[in-house]
Amino acid sequence: MAIIEVRDLGKRYGPRVAVDSVSFEVAEGEIFGILGPNGAGKSTTVECVAGLRTPDRGTVSVLGRRPADVRAAIGVQLQASELPERLRVGEALSLFSSFYPSPVDWSERLGLTPHLRAEFGRLSGGLKQRLSIALALIGSPRVAILDELTTGLDPQARRDTWSVIEDVRSTGVTILLVAHFMEEAARLCDRVAVFRDGRIAALDTPSGLVSRVDGSTRVRFVPSAAVDVASLSALPEVSDVSFAGEQLVVSGSENLLHAVTSFLARKQIVARQLRVDQVSLDDAYVELTGGSGVSDH
Ligand code: ADP
């Protein structure tokens, strides 16, 4: 069953179209990632799912209801969530836990325990970040919406946060997250929607996104004898053949290696210095978003 259902979502700010026509479903227990350049409409979309913005067009349902009617079941961590400067970490946690019937304390797991007496205004960016995750999860939500999961965290803290999210998922929580790094999407997400100009340019598993890219596999080698390039190019698995010095570079689909090596075997040609490269999720992302860089706030 779909826990989150977004149908033909549209949202403008004055004349500016932020989200044009977006549809997707998130299944129970899934980690669903949203990826895309700055201004692509990611935050507007997740804010509509969280019930914090009203769509101009289309429908959003969470747990089969309007988001505003199931607010208690949705945990939200949003961009730049601010708390009063003087509020201490421990006070924020107990204040927020008092709002919910069965609060869950993630502070130990998020490394906040040594900082319970620290004032919010004096926390480092990384600690503010971890506090906002703890507060999003404190109400034991069935759906967690995370917009700034690892922004401003150093690589180690980022990895720690990812393993916290995996723990959270293993408790059955459905997670909608705006991913700011390809590596994050590949590590955490079951499926990823790549946003571009207020629309979904592609929606697939991380490995599915990679295999969509034309010429996702590349084989390079130095042939022991002249290769008939025309018949090599005619193989259905091959999309491109070119030379780089004495190397032959062949691009094509996932079965490329087998097709090329059997072709060469038939011709009794040996492939020297054979190398196989696979397009990375980074490359796939660049291709799918038309070359614009990933957002990094
Ligand atoms: P993303 O999260 O992908 O960076 P956003 O959803 O924040 O994208 O923004 C989509 C577009 O809408 C951007 O062009 C942004 O400038 C614009 N926008 C976002 N919020 C507002 C707002 N409150 N008022 C006016 N324009 C906005």
Image (cartoon, helix red, strand yellow):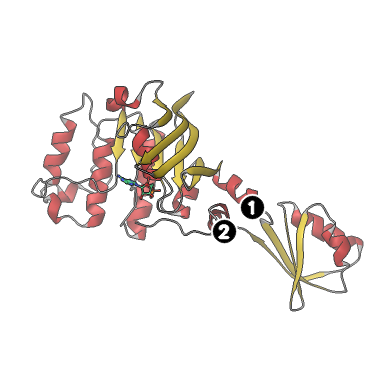
Badge 1 marks a residue whose secondary structure is: loop
Question: With respect to residue 87, does 54 lie above or below?
Answer: above
Outermost residue toward the front in this view: 15
Q: Is residue 63 left or right of residue 22?
A: left
Which residue sits furthest right? 267
Compared with 31, 155 (above or below) is below
Mark identifier at residue 213: 1
Under mark 1, the amino acid is Val
Q: Amino acid at mark 2?
A: Asp
**Viewer-proximal residue among 287 and 20:** 20
Q: Name the residue at 46% across, 34% down.
A: 30
**Percent position of residue 208, x then y:** 60, 45
Q: Which mark is residue 283?
A: 2
Q: Quadrant of residue 6?
A: top left
Count of numbered tags: 2
In space, the residues marked 2 and 1 are separated at their CA atoms by 9 Å
Residue 237 horizontal/vertical position (percent): 78, 53
Viewer-proximal residue among 228 and 190: 228
The reply to whether callout 2 and callout 1 are in contact (CB within 8 Å) is yes
- Work out which residue is located at the far bottom of the displayed protein and give it: 245
235 horizontally vs 70: left or right = right
Q: Can residue 166 be seen here?
A: no
On whether ligand 1 comes within 8 Å of the CB at mark 1, the answer is no
**Residue 172 coordinates in the image, percent (x, y):** 40, 30
Q: Is residue 214 left or right of residue 180?
A: right
Whichever of labels 2 and 1 marks the residue nearer the N terminus, that label is 1
